[in-house]
Image (tube, rainbow, N blue to C red):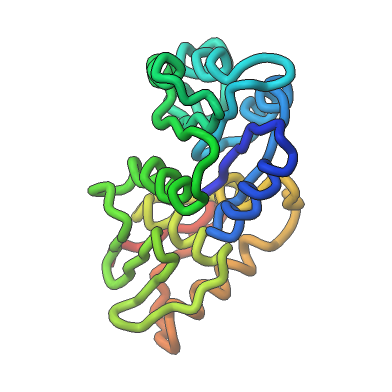
């Protein structure tokens, strides 16, 4: 999943970005409203982590602009927003939620709690909202970053895990390579790279485990589809 972190405190932004990346997320950053607006209108994000006090504006207004459709973000008005701020007063929390935030985390915070809140928000689009996804013989635990086929553990890299998670939230649907680049890799990826094809290839082999039958199907000219066994 691809996240946008909007935070102007450089040390905090680097620490949070590192923690999120270690948890397997692709993370872009912005330190101003202007940069965040540019990112949001170009890239399709699964979640926005938004500070309130920014050098050129505030997160309340940005969140409200997203919800009311004043800002044409790629993710649409339903983009999930987690406000991440030092403003802990009740009035600020109420305002943030009323302006459209899905969750509100007050600084200082524990990284483990932040990761749990991120997982909870990202689970909203999955069937049943469980931390464990299951499609046929595949199971994937988003909280512990573990995956299995039947009872066999799959030794997946972070990107393989991210690709499989994205496909498992859309079983039976064709997902293009471009869409996978948008949601699993960050903005530094070369759009002309073969990394999606290579990652899909290694993921298939690990899932198959010697079985010639692949449950990730290539749809020529369109992308990839996870079969619902």
Give coordinates of residue 47: x percent, y percent.
50, 37
Q: Residue furthest bottom?
A: 210
Q: Is residue 168 above or below residue 3?
A: below
Give coordinates of residue 59: x percent, y percent.
58, 20
Q: How many marks?
A: 0
| In the foreground, 200 or 68 | 68
Query: Is 176 situated left or right of 173 in this image?
Result: right
Q: Is residue 201 above or below residue 73?
A: below
Give coordinates of residue 93: x percent, y percent.
42, 21
Image point (23%, 48%), residue name = 128
Give coordinates of residue 31: x percent, y percent.
72, 30
Image point (33%, 41%), residue name = 124
Q: Residue furthest left?
A: 128
Image point (47%, 46%), residue name = 114
Q: Quadrant of residue 29?
A: top right
Quarter placement of the C terminus:
bottom left
Q: Is residue 222 above or below residue 101?
A: below
Image point (35%, 54%), residue name = 172
Q: Is residue 194 visible?
A: yes
Q: Quadrant of residue 80?
A: top left
Query: Is 38 situated left or right of 161 in this image?
Result: right
Q: Quadrant of residue 137?
A: bottom left
| In the foreground, 42 or 92 | 92
Q: Is residue 72 visible?
A: no
């Amino acid at each position: 999943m691809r996240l946008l972190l909007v935070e102007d405190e450089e040390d905090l932004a680097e620490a949070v970005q590192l923690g999120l990346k270690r948890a397997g997320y692709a993370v872009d950053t912005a330190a101003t409203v202007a940069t965040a607006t540019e990112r949001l209108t170009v890239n399709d994000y699964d979640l926005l982590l938004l500070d309130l006090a920014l050098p050129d504006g505030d997160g309340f207004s940005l969140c409200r602009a997203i919800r009311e459709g004043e800002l044409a973000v790629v993710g649409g008005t339903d983009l999930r927003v987690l406000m991440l701020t030092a403003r802990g007063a009740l009035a600020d929390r109420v305002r943030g939620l009323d302006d459209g935030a899905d969750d509100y985390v007050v600084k200082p915070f524990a990284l483990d709690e932040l990761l749990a809140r991120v997982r909870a928000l990202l689970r909203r689009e999955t069937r049943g909202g469980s931390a464990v996804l299951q499609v046929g013989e595949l199971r994937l635990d988003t909280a512990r970053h573990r995956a299995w086929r039947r009872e066999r553990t799959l030794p997946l890299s972070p990107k393989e895990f991210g690709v499989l998670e994205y496909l498992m939230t859309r079983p039976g649907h064709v997902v293009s390579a471009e869409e996978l680049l948008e949601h699993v890799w960050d903005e530094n990826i070369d759009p002309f790279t073969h990394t999606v094809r290579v990652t899909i290839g290694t993921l298939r082999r690990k899932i198959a485990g010697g079985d010639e039958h692949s449950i990730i199907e290539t749809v020529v000219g369109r992308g990839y589809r996870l079969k619902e066994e």
